[in-house]
Amino acid sequence: MQEFKLPKEKQWQTQSEPILKHGPLSGTTAPDFIPAAVGVVYVNTSALVIYISTGISSISDWRQIWAD
């Protein structure tokens, strides 16, 4: 069996970081910032809602794709 080791740096990015570096973004509210790229995933951890970015020009480029 192969062993997989995660890098020592963090594996997530907060909405205050301007450039996507490490996978899904998360916060406790809906995303209120312009996405840095198309296809960025954002998870609202309070309401259990997942969004994906469909553009990079405005806040309305976030689309809700799942809700609990």
Image: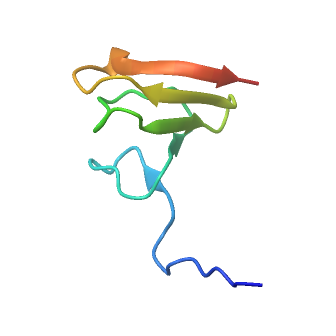
Relative to 3, 33 lies left or right: left
Q: Residue at x 55, y 19 (%)?
A: 64
Q: Residue at x 44, y 50 (%)?
A: 14
Compared to residue 44, the image places residue 62 above or below, namely above
Asked if residue 60 is positioned above or below residue 39 in the image, the reply reads above
Residue appearing at x 33%, y 20% in the figure: 59
Question: Which residue in the rendered view is the most extreme toward the front?
Answer: 1
Residue 13: % across, % down: 44, 54
Q: Quadrant of the C terminus?
A: top right
What is the number of callouts on the image? 0
Image position, residue 16 (x, y; %) = 35, 47
Quarter-wise, where is residue 62 in the image?
top left
Name above or below for residue 1 compared with residue 31.
below
In this view, the residue in front, 5 or 42, is: 5
Residue lying at the far left of the rendered structure: 57
Picture quarter containing residue 60? top left
Q: In the displayed structure, does residue 39 sit left or right of residue 45? A: left
Horizontal placement of 68 versus 20: left or right? Answer: right
**Residue 57 coordinates in the image, percent (x, y):** 22, 22
Quadrant assignment, res 44: top right
Point 30% across, 37% down: residue:
37
- Asked which colour scheme the image uses, the reply is rainbow
User: Which of the image's four quarters has the N terminus?
Assistant: bottom right
x and y percentages locating residue 53 in the rendered image? 40, 28
